[in-house]
Image (tube, grey):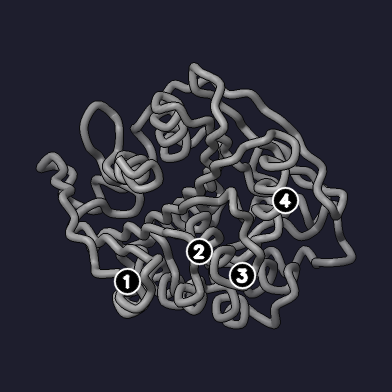
Amino acid sequence: MPILESTYKPPFLFKNGFVATVYSGLARRVTLEQERERITLKDGDFLDLDWSYSKEKSNKLIILLHGLEGHGQRPYVTGAAKLFNANGVDAVCMNFRGCSGEENLKYYSYHSGATGDLIEVIQHAITNKNYTDIYLKGISLGANIILKYLGEGNVVPNEVKAAVAVSVPCNLSGAAKELHALKNKLYHDRFLKPLVKRLEEKQRRFPGYLKEADVKSIKTLYDFDNVYTSKAHGFKDAEDYYDKCASLQFLPNIKTPSLIINALNDSFLSPECYPVKEAKNNANLYLEMPNFGGHSGFVHKKNVYYNERRALEFVLGE
């Protein structure tokens, strides 16, 4: 599809990508009542789902996927859930393995290309919850998972009607280089600390898989992916993981209407993360590149973010 012209115009202060990103991650608050459901996965592990509902009984559902080390109570997730609930759509925030406040049971957990758990959640929503219209929305890592799922050759159920991917690092190798740049050191370190802390616990629980010295050798996110993410999930190394899991290569195959919103001032994204060619050559792929928004920082009116309003417009055709 042709590239979409963005109408996003943030308040002056939030034209700065750093300010928008930090404010949205640390200062935004969203009040939402959720109900937690734990489902058992095919491999015996578990997944925690956080549900919220529209006032009237609905056959429509949006499945929300968070970013790296996020969870179902992050405002960028609950903000979307609250807006969709107010417009007749139920919502479920999918906590990735180990991200719901309790460590998962397996040595492996989640990563940017782990689509299997999303497949099980979609099937759960169809088979056990009887939803007939399902939409997908992901932020950052979660957005990459959604796009990979839609384009990697899975049988996408007819119930899945549309998807929205926001701040997508669809070229993982390029995005990793950006995240390791000096300009992003604050973000890098904030991501790394909890990851290493959780890995220390995994090393104690699974000493046969990982040595204490291996964990101590991790100084960067690249090290983490090289030592743990790649090896635990069947990849040779970090670069092999980035190469095989980047959603960019799967975009030409997407047949479900999908909207990508990547801000041009997102410091996490490399030039390759703006898939202009892929969008122009796929009638199901829509690309919007606002000048502002930082990384998931699309501050707008009345605590409803621009990307949330656009998601509602896109999936419901409003």
Give the distance between the C-alpha atoms of the residues marked 2 and 4, in whole angstroms.
16 Å
Give the distance between the C-alpha atoms of the residues marked 1 and 3, in whole angstroms.
23 Å
Few, some or many C-alpha atoms within 10 Å of disc 2 (few <14, some 14-19, many ≥20)? many
> Closer to the N terminus: mark 4 or mark 1?
4
Q: In terms of secondary structure, where does tag 4 sit? A: helix
Relative depth, front residue between 194 and 287:
287
Tell me the residue that label 2 is attached to: 147
> Closer to the N terminus: mark 2 or mark 4?
4
Relative depth, front residue between 222 and 164:
164
114 displayed left or right of 164: right
Q: Where residue 225 is drawn, which disc sits there?
A: 3
Tell me the residue that label 1 is attached to: 274
Tell me the residue that label 4 is attached to: 120
Q: Where residue 46 is drawn, which disc sits there?
A: none
Picture quadrant where residue 149 is located: bottom right
Of marks 3 and 4, the one in the foreground: 4
